Image (spheres, rainbow, N blue to C red):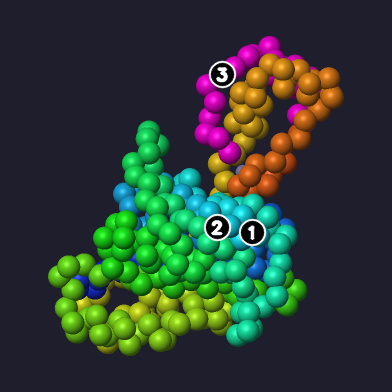
């Protein structure tokens, strides 16, 4: 099933569900991630997409998980609506499975903080920070929503990695209770959570985002489902922005690149390689510092 995200409203409850198998696989191949890195990055990218559905249309969102584990920072952001990109600092780190046979995401992330920044094209709007509970990401995001946004929520995130390292299924959901939610709706959703306990397996079985959200709404009447929307791995880097960053490094740095005869820069977020030959570097020297685009 292709990657999609869908929202729904039930009395006193807001829901979002997403299938993210293809975009997590795209991130894995771009960054050459180990299974545990794929799971950590995939869960974080899925969480960023889910949270981005709870903010205003022109706002964007970044999740940065800064743990002291071997993976280093895990970062995901939504530079454009329905597009997500991300990276993990040490994508090749691998660890043995946990005693339960699961990928050791919590151990790979370690102790630390989770930061969520919301920004509009013009300015930063809000940054919330919470201490990581487990580094498993879903419960860390749940804590962030409760402590920083005062919204009681349930978050489920899953990435299933095949023995060959590719992504077999990835998905997530978010349920947020409003102050006017009834006991009846809450207990129905609580029961339904067992149906979606493993969203990555549901994605592997071919369920769509709509199927996933319907499972959460079993027994609840008068729910409104919105149209599912396609989502994708999407970066906003380009040669012009990378050139502006090179210029921003300063004249001496640029001069040493000209002397070397070339420079190759990789975008952090998508690992795209930008190669600049001597003539282009000299052209950047001539143009001099210019307004830099966003830092990639
Ligand atoms: Zn990029």
Which residue is disc 1 drawn over?
A: 71
Residue 240 versus residue 136 in the image, above or below: above
Q: Which residue is mark 3?
A: 290
| Count of marks overlaid on the render | 3
Tell me whether circle 1 and circle 2 mark residues in contact (CB < 8 Å): yes
* Crowd tier of the residue under label 2, counting other residues whose Cα lies within 10 Å: few below 14, some 14–19, many 20 or above: many
Q: Please tell me which residue is depicted at 47% across the width and 56% down the height of the picture.
A: 113
Magenta extent: 276-296
Residue found 62% across the figure and 36% down from its top = 238
Residue 28: image quadrant is bottom right
Q: CA distance from mark 3 to mark 1?
A: 35 Å
Is residue 179 rendered magenta in the image? no
Of marks 3 and 1, the one in the foreground: 1
Establish if 243 lies above or below 184. Answer: above
Q: Quadrant of the C terminus?
A: top right
First in sequence, mark 3 or 1: give its number.
1
Answer with left or right where residue 81 lies relative to residue 74.
left
Label 2: which secondary element: strand
Mark whose residue sits in front, 3 or 2: 2
Q: Position of residue 216 (x, y in %)?
A: 35, 80
Please tell me in which quarter of the rendered image ligand 1 is found: top right
N-terminal-most mark, 3 or 2: 2
Give the structural element (helix, strand or loop) at label 3. loop
Relative to 117, say whether 136 is above or below: below
Q: Quadrant of the N terminus?
A: bottom right
Q: Which element carries disc 1, helix, strand or loop?
A: loop
Q: Which residue is mark 2?
A: 67
Do the residues bearing badges 3 and 2 touch, measured as CB atoms within 8 Å?
A: no
Task: Say whether residue 279 is left or right of residue 3.
Answer: right
Vertical comparison of 137 with 81: above or below: below
Task: Tell me if residue 280 is in the magenta stretch.
Answer: yes
241 and 3: which one is in front?
241
């Amino acid at each position: 099933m292709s990657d999609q995200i869908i929202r729904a409203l039930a009395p006193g409850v807001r829901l979002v569900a997403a299938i993210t198998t293809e975009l997590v696989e795209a991130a894995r191949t771009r960054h050459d991630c180990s299974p545990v890195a794929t799971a950590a990055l995939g869960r974080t990218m899925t969480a960023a997409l889910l949270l981005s559905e709870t903010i205003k249309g022109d706002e964007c969102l970044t999740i940065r998980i800064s743990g002291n584990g071997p993976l280093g920072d895990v970062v995901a952001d939504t530079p454009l609506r329905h597009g997500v990109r991300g990276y993990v600092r040490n994508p090749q780190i691998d660890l043995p499975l946990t005693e339960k046979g699961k990928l050791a995401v919590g151990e790979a992330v370690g102790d630390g903080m989770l930061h969520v920044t919301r920004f509009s094209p013009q300015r930063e709007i809000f940054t919330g920070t919470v201490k990581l509970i487990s580094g498993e990401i879903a419960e860390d995001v749940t804590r962030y929503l409760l402590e920083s946004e005062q919204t009681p929520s349930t978050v489920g995130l899953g990435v299933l990695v095949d023995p060959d390292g590719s992504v077999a299924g990835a998905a997530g959901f978010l349920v947020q209770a409003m102050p006017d939610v009834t006991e009846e709706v809450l207990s129905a959703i609580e029961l339904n959570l067992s149906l979606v306990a493993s969203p990555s397996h549901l994605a592997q079985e071919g369920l769509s985002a709509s199927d996933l959200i319907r499972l959460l709404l079993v027994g609840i009447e008068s729910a409104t489902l919105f149209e599912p929307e396609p989502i994708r791995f999407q970066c906003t880097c380009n040669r012009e922005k990378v050139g502006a960053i090179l210029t921003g490094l300063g004249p001496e740095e640029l001069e040493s690149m000209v002397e070397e005869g070339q420079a190759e820069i990789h975008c952090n977020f998508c690992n795209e390689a930008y190669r600049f030959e001597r003539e282009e570097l000299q052209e950047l020297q001539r143009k001099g510092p210019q307004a830099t685009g966003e830092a990639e």
